Every structure is written in structure tokens, then in C-alpha cells.
Image: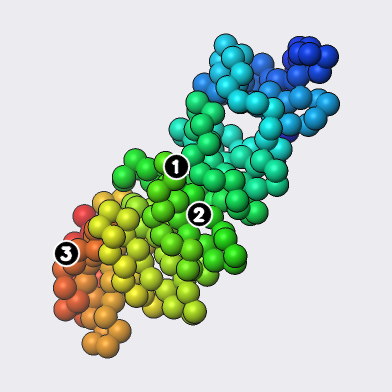
């Protein structure tokens, strides 16, 4: 939460409204005005056209086409036009991530001590049944529930159980080494959950050549 560095102000209907000219528009073509009397924020464009009412208590910066904001003590999502895209019903700040593989902005929300994923348009990607969700990269999430871990591939919708040491990090080519613990052999998988090389190799050194 995110009091802007305000170096300018104007008077509107008797209220002092502050805004920044120093950092304004550094990352985005929209920014925030603050009403000093109510301590509420409104979204504004680069011409200082006010896009929303002064009704938001907290906000996060726009780095994409949407951002998380708080209204009446609850978090939701708005876009750059000021349209509210995700209902304001979440008490905890959502973790945002921009997946460049799918060009999709998403948010990890918490609801009743369970976490799920919603994209910036309001579409549910992963239901609120998980204890923890981590965004890795390449449209891949790690899901945790009841001491069990899974990899979820957003591109294909596939979900596979994993254990410690089963999968290395995906490299710049979108490939990772996998291990079959039963036979203690190694192979290679890509970011769509496709097995590039089966688990038939005796050690990691033998499969590294397939990562390029």
C-alpha cells in the first residue's frame, strides 16, 4: 500500500488532491490521485482525466493491463480503464504474475485459507482448494495440498504429482531433467509436460546434452 510520492496538488470541490509528476507514467500510462481529506485514491490517465471515483484505500502499481486494489477492506482487480474485473471479496493481497508464455496476467488469491488462481479477465484458472500455489515460469505452477506437490501446466491443463528432486528447474529452452525414483533413471521433459527423452539414462550428465 502505496502512498505515491506526491509533489503536486490541485483543489477539487474544496478537497486537496495530490499526485506525482516525478514518477508519474514511469511504468504505465495511468496513475493515482489521492484525496487528502478521505485518504482515498482514484485512477487517472496521463491527461489527468479521472477514470474512477475516489474509493480505493490501497493499490499496487500497473505493470501490465491490470492491477490489484482495495475497496472497503477487500481486494479486487481493475484494468487501465478503471473497470473492476474481479469481485472485491478477498481479504489478503493477491500475488500477481505475468505469464509471457501465454501472455496472460494472473493473480493468486486466498479465500477461506485456500488459494486459487484467477486471470485478469476474471476467469478462474485454478479452484480454491490448494494450501499453496507457486508460480515457476513458462506457464507452470507448483500446487501444494495435504503434503502433496504437483506441477500444473497452464498451456495444456495437465497436472502431475511430483516429489523432491523429481524435476529440475526449466532452463531457457523450456526443458528440465526428470528422475524416475523407482528405477533411478533420468530423462527430459518440456514445458507442455511432454517427455522429450524417456527415463532410461543412468545419470544427469548423460541427459544434459538433450537440454539444448
**Residue that carries the numbered disc 2 in the rendered image:** 108
> Which quadrant would the C terminus be assigned to in this image?
bottom left
Q: Which of the two marks, 2 or 3, is nearer to us in this view? A: 2
Q: Local crowd at mark 3 within 10 Å, few (<14), some, or many (≥20)?
A: some
Mark 1 nearby-residue class (10 Å; few <14, some 14–19, many ≥20) = many
Disc with the residue nearer the chain's start (1 vs 2) = 2
Q: Is residue 206 above or below residue 212?
A: below
Q: Which residue sits at x=54%, y=66%?
A: 114
Which one is closest to the eye, mark 3 or mark 1? 1
Q: Quadrant of the N terminus?
A: top right
Q: CA distance from mark 1 to mark 2?
A: 11 Å
Q: Position of residue 111 (x, y in %)?
A: 57, 61
SS at badge 3: strand
183 or 204, nearer to the observer: 183
Mark 1–mark 2 CB contact (< 8 Å): no
Residue at left 31%, top 45%?
102
User: What residue appears at the point 54 percent right and 28 percent down from the top-left corner?
Assistant: 82
Is 98 on the left or on the right of 29, as rendered? left
- Label 3, on which residue? 196
Tell me the CA gap for discs 3 and 1: 32 Å
* Picture quadrant where residue 32 is located: top right
Q: Determine which of the numbered discs, if any, sits on residue 120 in the image.
A: 1
Task: Please say if the residues under marks 3 and 1 sit with CB atoms less than 8 Å apart.
Answer: no
Residue 153, placed above or below residue 45? below
Residue 134 relative to residue 173: left or right:
right
Amino acid at each position: 500500500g502505496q502512498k505515491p510520492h506526491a509533489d503536486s496538488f490541485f483543489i477539487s470541490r474544496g478537497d486537496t488532491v495530490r499526485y506525482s509528476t516525478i514518477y508519474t507514467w514511469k511504468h504505465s500510462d495511468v496513475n493515482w490521485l489521492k484525496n487528502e481529506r478521505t485518504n482515498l485514491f482514484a485512477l487517472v490517465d496521463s491527461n489527468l482525466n479521472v477514470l474512477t471515483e475516489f474509493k480505493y484505500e490501497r493499490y499496487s502499481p500497473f505493470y501490465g493491463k491490470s492491477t490489484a486494489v482495495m475497496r472497503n477492506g477487500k481486494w479486487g482487480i481493475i484494468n487501465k480503464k478503471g473497470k473492476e474485473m474481479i469481485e472485491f471479496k478477498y481479504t489478503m493481497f493477491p500475488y500477481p504474475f505475468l505469464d509471457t508464455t501465454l501472455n496472460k496476467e494472473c493473480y493468486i488469491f486466498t479465500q477461506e485459507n485456500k488459494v486459487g488462481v484467477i486471470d485478469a479477465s476474471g476467469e478462474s484458472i485454478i479452484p480454491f482448494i490448494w494450501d499453496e500455489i507457486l508460480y515457476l515460469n513458462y506457464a507452470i505452477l507448483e500446487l501444494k495440498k495435504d503434503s502433496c506437490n504437483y506441477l500444473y501446466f497452464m498451456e495444456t491443463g495437465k497436472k502431475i504429482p511430483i516429489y523432491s528432486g523429481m524435476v529440475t528447474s526449466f532452463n531457457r529452452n523450456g526443458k528440465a531433467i526428470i528422475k524416475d525414483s523407482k528405477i533411478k533413471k533420468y530423462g527430459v521433459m518440456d514445458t507442455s509436460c511432454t517427455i522429450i527423452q524417456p527415463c532410461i539414462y543412468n545419470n544427469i550428465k548423460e541427459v544434459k546434452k538433450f537440454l539444448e
